[in-house]
Structures are given as structure tokens and as C-alpha cells.
Image (spheres, coloured by chain):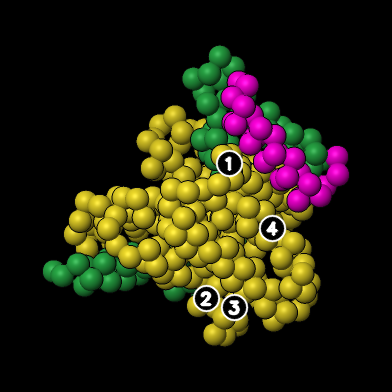
Amino acid sequence: MNHSVFRLTLPILFGYLPLGMAFGVLFATQLEYAWWIAPLMGVVIFAGAGQILAVSLLAANAGLVEVFVAMFVLNARHLFYGLSLLGQFRGAGWRKVYLIFGLTDETYSLLTSRPRGPDRAYEQTVDFRITAFNQGYWVIGCALGALLADNVAFNSTGIEFALVALFIVLTIEQLKALGDSLPVWLGAAAAGVAMIALPPAHQLIGAIAIVTAILLLHYRRIRGEQSSEGDVNRG
Amino acid sequence: MAESTYIAAFIAVAAVATFATRVIPFLFFERHTEHPLIQHLGRYLPAAVMALLATVFLQRSGTWTADLPGFDALIPGLLVIAVHLWQRNALLSIAAGTASYMVIQQTGVF
């Protein structure tokens, strides 16, 4: 089982190691703090863009209220992820806190895309291992980057595309599993609108807010049609 | 504030803020998992979010000011789609796309 979890998370390994290292290098070169604080942040925060933002906040000696607001706003897209996992995480016991803690973009993608059997406790164990493997890659990346700082031997330019490729693959898988392309077009269109209308820092949350609002309208329309069909049947 | 106190407080605040964004839906919607609206979002939101993540990050991977705007990311992206529709092997699709992107970025052909 660990072997299959490893296979499943391999694209995350290729994405998280270089990104984690990028954060580690940034941390070590921009700040005067001890190197091990970089992996420590990977352990207790575990947010890619958030930690990179944290480097500039630290460099600016930002106030703690400002830090809270900035980190909350930057990660606000995660507010929507839990909505599709409420049922899956139900009854996961002590594991649940960690499953919620580790809900990054990439972990969310894997957990919502993989096929599931009827045994929920078993599936939650797999979810837990996926999350832990992903965080392991991330923490190792943060540590390596901070330690190596400026002597990176292998030219890994572009390897972070693994995460983009993963999102494309998962979109295709979602499309096949759902048998309905509507949400895919809505998601892409919302991203397009957000990228035109918003600065880069707010594009992800903007796109997710747009697509959630459209799905709410979609839900109201379906419910409306269903209830009017009910009226016809009754009449 | 001493430097070590500041960094400890900073990390604690950043960790709490990040965890808050992830735990809030579980605190406020836990009792409503059977609600048809939550079921509707659970069914459609992952596909929509995946498509928007793919779109946003694909756009950010490309050089749109080049002579062939965005080709350095669009070609690897199309390769991922083609290989995945052909073999439906996630690792193969991702490896093909990533390798081609690395070659394009490192050689600067576009």
C-alpha cells in the first residue's frame, strides 16, 4: 500500500522538492535566521505560496496582525476545499486534524481525484499517508534549499512544471469520472476572468469565488427545475 | 521584541492563520454534509477547481511576451493532454510534459 501511495504522490515529489528548495534558498539568502527555521516552517505552516510570502514579511519585520491577515487572505482559497471533503473526513478520529491541516492545493487535488472503495476507514488511512508523504517532500525540500543555498549542482530549471502537469492530468480524470464537462469549462472561464480582472496575488481566490457563486446559481436552477417538474407531475 | 521571540510568534501566527483557512468549513458545515447544496458543491467543485488551477498555473508557466506567446508552456501542456488521452498513465503524462518544459526553458527555443 505504501508503494502505491508513493506512486500516487510521485508527481508531488517532483513539484514539492524544487519548490521547497526555492523557498529554502530564498529564506537562507534573504534572512539572517538559522537554516533549520525553514524546514520548521514547512512542518508547522505547510503552505507553499504562504511561506514564500512569509519571507518578505519577515524581511520587512511585519507586525503580527499584518502577518495573520496576509497569510489568511493568501490562503483563503482553502476555505472552499473542505466543502467537498466534509463527508470523506467524517469519523477519521485523531487523523482528521492532520488531514485538515495538510489540505494544500496538491493534496486536495489527489484526495478528490483518486478512486475510492466502500471502506471509509481504510480510505482515510490512505488519505492520511498521502498527506504525510506530501508534507515529507515539502519539509525535505525546505531543508535542502536552506542548507545548500547557492550551490545547487543540477540544473532543475522548469521541473516545477510537474505540478502544472499534475493539475492538467487531474482535470482530465475529473472530467472522465464526472461525465460532465460543465464544471471544467466554468473553472477555466473563471480563471480567465480572474486573470484579466485581478492582480496575480488575488487570482486564485477570485477564480474560486466566481466559480463557487456560479455553482450556487446552477444549484438553484436545478432545484427550481426539479420542483417545477414535481408540480407538473402532481398536476 | 527579541529576535527569537519575534520569529517564534511570527511562525505561530502564520501557522494559525493557515490552519484557520483549512479548518473553517469543517467547523461550520460539519452538520450539513447531507444537505443537497453541499452535495452539489462536493460533486462539481473539485473539477472546477482543478480546471482553474491548471489554467492559472499554466498561464504563469508561460512567457507571454515571446514571439510565440505562451508556446513555452502551451506545448508541454498540450503534450500532457495528448499523452494522457493516449495512455492514461498519470506519471507518464506528467513526466513527458515536465521533461519537454525543462528542455524548452533551459534551451530557450521559444
Query: Is disc 4 surrounded by few (<14), some (14 to 19) or many (20+) residues within 10 Å?
Result: some
Give the residue type at disc 4. Answer: Leu
Which numbered disc, 2 or 3, marks the residue that appears first in the sequence?
A: 3
| Residue in the image at 73% along x and 45% along y | B95
Q: Which mark is residue A98?
A: 2
**Dot in front, 4 or 2:** 4
Answer yes or no: is residue B54 visible.
Answer: no
Are callouts 4 and 1 both on one chain?
A: yes
Q: What percent of the width, then of the height, locates residue A112?
A: 65, 60
- What residue appears at the point 21 percent right and 51 percent down from the top-left corner? A60
Label 1–label 2 contact, CB within 8 A: no
Q: Chain of mark 2?
A: A
Mark 4 residue element: helix
Residue B27 sits in quarter: bottom left
Q: Which sits earlier in the primary sequence, circle 3 or circle 1?
A: 3
Query: Which image quadrant is residue B43 in?
Result: bottom right
Chain B rendering hue: green
Give the residue number, with chain letter if any, for mark 1: A155
**Chain assignment, label 4:** A
Range shown magenta? B86-110
Instruction: Name the residue type under label 3.
Output: Arg
Among the two numbered marks 4 and 1 on one chain, the one whose residue lies closer to the N terminus? 4
